[in-house]
Image (spheres, grey):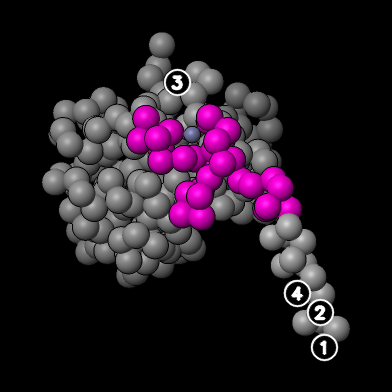
Amino acid sequence: MLLTLITILKRSIIDFTALFFPSVCKKCYTALNKKELYLCRRCLTSLPYSRYEQFYSNPVNKTFWGRTKIEFASSIFLFRQNETVQNLIYRLKYKNDPQCGIFLGEIAGHIYINSTIFKKADIIIPVPLHPSKEKDRGYNQCAKIAQGISKVTGIPVENNLLQRVAPAHSQTSKHKYDRWLNCEESFRVNNNNEIKDKKVLLIDDVITTGATLEACCNKLNNLKNINLYILTIAYTEIE
Ligand SMILES: [Zn+2]
């Protein structure tokens, strides 16, 4: 009874707050309607969509040519300084806002299923975080994006098949540690049978050099008959 009262009271406070402080668009600060989240419809449609999913020779796909075997790679947005996309990714990574990852993932999911080049994957694998980093953040931001994509596409997310391995004690210098982060040995596949013969969609938040994704792919490509697809939320061109 008391619990029910507290729940009702909490709900009333939330509704009351929403009445005077409605959620506003993170870009233009107009009030959002009930169907909108983070951005109003106008701002959502004016984001810097790359459209890379529509053409095979896109810069993200080309990043991997000659480096590792993949079927296709793309990013949803172009990542520009002080852009809304950058702010949303910042919220997701540093402001304890996992919901923002699901939001971005849903946008990605709709674009993914409408691409003629992506083949529908059997499983989605988010790029794993180091366990200590995940503990600090409370969640893996890539897993949240994957969750959003799964919501739209119905493709299951596998969070535990690919894992980060803790570095050896010798990797203590920053330089050595950074190199370790992006090498094949820093990843482990937990259940080979679950991944082999599958079409896998790998998810990351932002791609810059592609080194981490390349390391993941190299590890996964050791498995039999695997087809890898890569999708990231944003792409940063290297200057
Ligand atoms: Zn807006």
The local secondary structure at tag 4 comes to: helix
Q: Is residue 23 magenta?
A: yes
- The majority secondary structure of the magenta stretch comes to loop
Residue 113 visible (yes or no): yes
The local secondary structure at tag 1 comes to: loop
Residue corresponding to mark 4: 8
Task: Report the amino acid beneath label 1.
Answer: Met
Q: CA distance from mark 4 to mark 2?
A: 5 Å
Answer with left or right where residue 172 lies relative to residue 128: right
- The local crowd at label 2, few if under 14, some if 14 to 19, many if 20 or more residues have their Cα within 10 Å, is few
Of the numbered discs 1 and 4, the one sitting upstream in the chain is 1
Q: CA distance from mark 3 to mark 4?
A: 43 Å
Task: Report the amino acid beneath label 4.
Answer: Ile
Residue 1 has which mark? 1
Establish if 152 lies above or below 31: below
* Disc 1: residue Cβ within 8 A of ligand 1's nearest atom: no
Q: CA distance from mark 1 to mark 3?
A: 52 Å
The magenta-colored residue range is 17-46
Residue 101 visible (yes or no): no
Of the numbered discs 3 and 4, the one sitting upstream in the chain is 4
- The local crowd at label 3, few if under 14, some if 14 to 19, many if 20 or more residues have their Cα within 10 Å, is some
Q: Quadrant of residue 212?
A: top left
Establish if 12 lies above or below 56: below
Q: CA distance from mark 3 to mark 2?
A: 47 Å
Please state which of residues 90 and 168 is positioned toward the viewer in this rendering: 90
Residue corresponding to mark 2: 5
Query: Mark 4 touching mark 2, by CB under 8 A?
Result: yes
Answer with left or right where residue 137 lies relative to residue 226: right
Q: CA distance from mark 1 to mark 4?
A: 11 Å
Residue corresponding to mark 3: 80
